[in-house]
Image (spheres, rainbow, N blue to C red):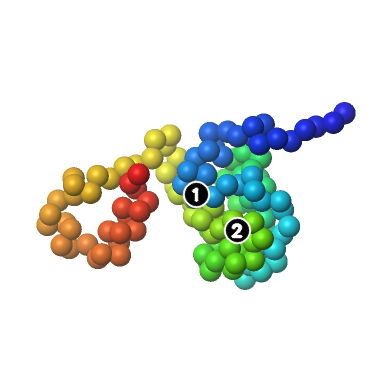
Amino acid sequence: MTLRLERGTFTTTFTQRLKELSGQDLFTCYQCGKCSAGCPSASVMETPPHAVVRLAWLGQEKALRGLNTYWLCAACLTCDLRCPKGIDVSRIMEALRVMFLRPREEPDMVAPDSLPKDMLSRIPQQALVAGLRKYTK
């Protein structure tokens, strides 16, 4: 029996949302393992980064939920530099953290115009920019 793996077979709402949040196409990864080989945190991770990408590629949300890998990612971008396909694995890890912290179907949205003027003068600029980057379309 032959099992044919195609992109459409594994495209789920989970993989679509992960792609939307990370901006990375999981399906371009061909599992060379260079991201895991160069990762300084890989020795303490339950599952290496390339395997996390594979689980995400397969839509294994339940299996991913219990891992510590995306919490231990230092976002050092070594994986991005080593990947021959240019996949930024640290963005995928960040997207997984966001997805599991905010499990609602509809992502939070912030309209910059709706923020109170007095609050804009009190918040650090870096926090404001980071918040708008993650919570706006």
Q: Residue furthest right?
A: 1
Q: Position of residue 52 (x, y in %)?
A: 64, 51
- Residue 45, x across and y down, in percent: 64, 61
Q: Earlier in the sequence, mark 1 or mark 2?
A: 1
What residue does disc 2 label?
86
Three-letter amino acid code at the position of disc 1: Gly
Q: Is residue 109 above or below residue 49?
A: above
Residue 64 location (% of width, % of height)? 60, 46
Check the image and name the residue furthest to the bottom.
40
In space, the residues marked 1 and 2 are separated at their CA atoms by 12 Å
Q: Quadrant of the C terminus?
A: top left
- In the picture as drawn, the residue positioned furthest to the top comes out as 1
The residue under label 2 is which amino acid type?
A: Gly
Q: Secondary structure at mark 2?
A: loop
Horizontal side, residue 132 vs residue 105: left or right: left
The relative height of residue 15 versus residue 33 in the rendered view (above or below) is: above
Q: Which residue is mark 1?
A: 23
Residue 112 relative to residue 92: left or right:
left
